[in-house]
Amino acid sequence: MWVYDFRVGEHFTLKTRPMRREHLDDFVAAYLPGRPHSERVESQRFKKFDVDDLLKRDKVNLEITWLKDPTLEDADSLLPPAVIAREIVDDLQSALNEFAAIAEALGEPVTDEIETGQPL
């Protein structure tokens, strides 16, 4: 099984750094779509795991990691709590807006306001 670790060192948000197609270019280049798996080459982020080894894992756990996230090792490099909180609020607000649009498209108008006082 081939695994590409896209999590380590990546940080995306809906507003300030949304994920874009070009962020996946390295994965696509490594995956070699339309070509035989035998042509794939392991890299720092892209590794091949033997099925027998995977089956030996506790409950065949596929939570596979091998890269260490430097931001988790160095507390000074973490985002400030206020920035994290703001990003969470922004993401939740965006999600609420999307669900409100879906509800309205389904014929159920949304008129409630959330605690921030901003209309949905």
Image (cartoon, rainbow, N blue to C red):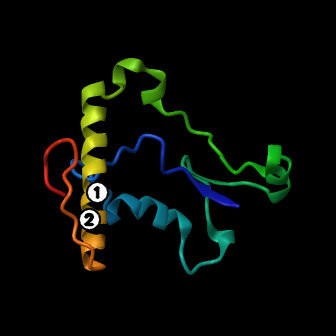
Cβ–Cβ below 8 Å for labels 1 and 2? yes
Q: Nearer the viewer, residue 71 or 106?
A: 106
**Residue sitting at x 40%, y 63%:** 25
Residue 47 drawn at (x, y percent): 64, 53
Tell me the quarter of the picture where residue 88 sits.
Answer: top left
In the figure, 43 relative to 70: above or below? below
Residue 55 drawn at (x, y percent): 84, 53
The quadrant of the rendering that contains the C terminus is bottom left
Q: Residues within 10 Å of mark 2 (few under 14, many from 20)?
A: some
- Residue 99 located left or right of residue 45: left
Mark 1: which amino acid? Leu
Q: Nearer the viewer, residue 118 or 112?
A: 112
Give the Cα distance between marks 1 and 2.
6 Å
In the figure, 38 relative to 61: above or below? below
Residue 66 drawn at (x, y percent): 62, 40
Mark number, residue 100: 2
In the figure, 77 relative to 60: above or below? above
Query: Element under label 2?
Result: helix
Residue 92 drawn at (x, y percent): 30, 49
Q: Nearer the viewer, residue 41 or 110?
A: 110
**Residue sitting at x 79%, y 56%:** 50
Query: Element under label 1?
Result: helix
Tell me the quarter of the picture where residue 26 sits.
Answer: bottom left
